[in-house]
């Protein structure tokens, strides 16, 4: 599963409005020329909000003419873990028990701001029948 969301960019004289149609509360403005970094930060904020609210993360839609924005690799892995937990009906406590660790460890594994070790996230994904694969391509 690729986590890449379409973004709508509306340019004005010196600023750019950024919105993610799939994440209704994710919109902001930034100075022209900074929309790339601002869009990634906004996407992470929107995904983080879904996790904090324990709500379902919307699937990315397909929109013609809209560029796609991908979160950083570790954020993508954490989102995939959160989604796998939701699919399996697992709480932080239940996954921690399965992993032989404490709830705080799992909480940090799905905290998009925490610098978790990717091997921990991979192990949790594997336990849930998922495998993390990284793809490298030209920009």
Image (cartoon, rainbow, N blue to C red):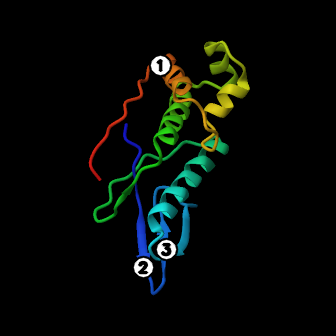
Which tag, 1 or 2, sits closer to the chain's start?
2
Q: Position of residue 58 (x, y in %)?
A: 48, 47
Tags 1 and 2 touching, CB below 8 Å: no
Q: Position of residue 5 (x, y in %)?
A: 41, 53
Which tag, 1 or 3, sits closer to the chain's start?
3
Q: Position of residue 103 (x, y in %)?
A: 72, 24
Direction bottom: furthest residue: 13
Which tag, 2 or 3, sits closer to the chain's start?
2
Query: Is 120 rendered above or below residue 30?
Result: above
Residue pictured at 43% horizontal, 46% vertical: 59
For label 2, the SS is strand
Tags 2 and 3 touching, CB below 8 Å: yes
Residue 17 numbered mark, or none = 3
Residue pictured at 52% horizontal, 29% vertical: 118
Residue closer to the observer: 87 or 81? 81
Q: Which residue is under mark 2?
A: 11
Q: Which residue is under mark 1?
A: 126
Query: Is 119 rendered above or below residue 39?
Result: above
Residue pictured at 52% horizontal, 44% vertical: 57
Tags 1 and 3 touching, CB below 8 Å: no
User: Could you tell me how far apart the alpha carbons at marks 1 and 2 are, in whole angstroms?
Assistant: 43 Å
Quadrant into which the N terminus falls: top left
**Total numbered labels:** 3
Q: Is residue 102 left or right of residue 120?
A: right
User: Could you tell me how far apart the alpha carbons at marks 1 and 3 are, in whole angstroms?
Assistant: 39 Å
Residue pictured at 34% horizontal, 63% vertical: 66
For label 3, the SS is strand
Query: Is 95 rendered above or below residue 139?
Result: above
């Amino acid at each position: 599963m690729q986590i890449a969301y379409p973004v709508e960019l509306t340019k004005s004289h010196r600023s750019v409005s950024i919105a993610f149609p799939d994440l209704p509360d994710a919109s902001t403005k930034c100075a022209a020329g900074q929309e790339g970094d601002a869009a990634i930060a906004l996407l992470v904020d929107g995904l983080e909000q879904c996790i904090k609210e324990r709500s379902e993360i919307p699937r990315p839609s397909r929109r013609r003419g809209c560029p796609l924005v991908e979160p950083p690799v570790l954020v993508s892995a954490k989102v995939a873990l959160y989604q796998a937990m939701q699919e399996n009906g697992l709480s932080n406590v239940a996954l921690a028990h399965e992993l032989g660790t404490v709830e705080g460890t799992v909480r940090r594994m799905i905290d998009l701001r925490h610098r978790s070790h990717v091997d921990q996230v991979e192990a949790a994904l594997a336990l849930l029948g998922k495998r993390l694969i990284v793809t490298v391509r030209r920009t």
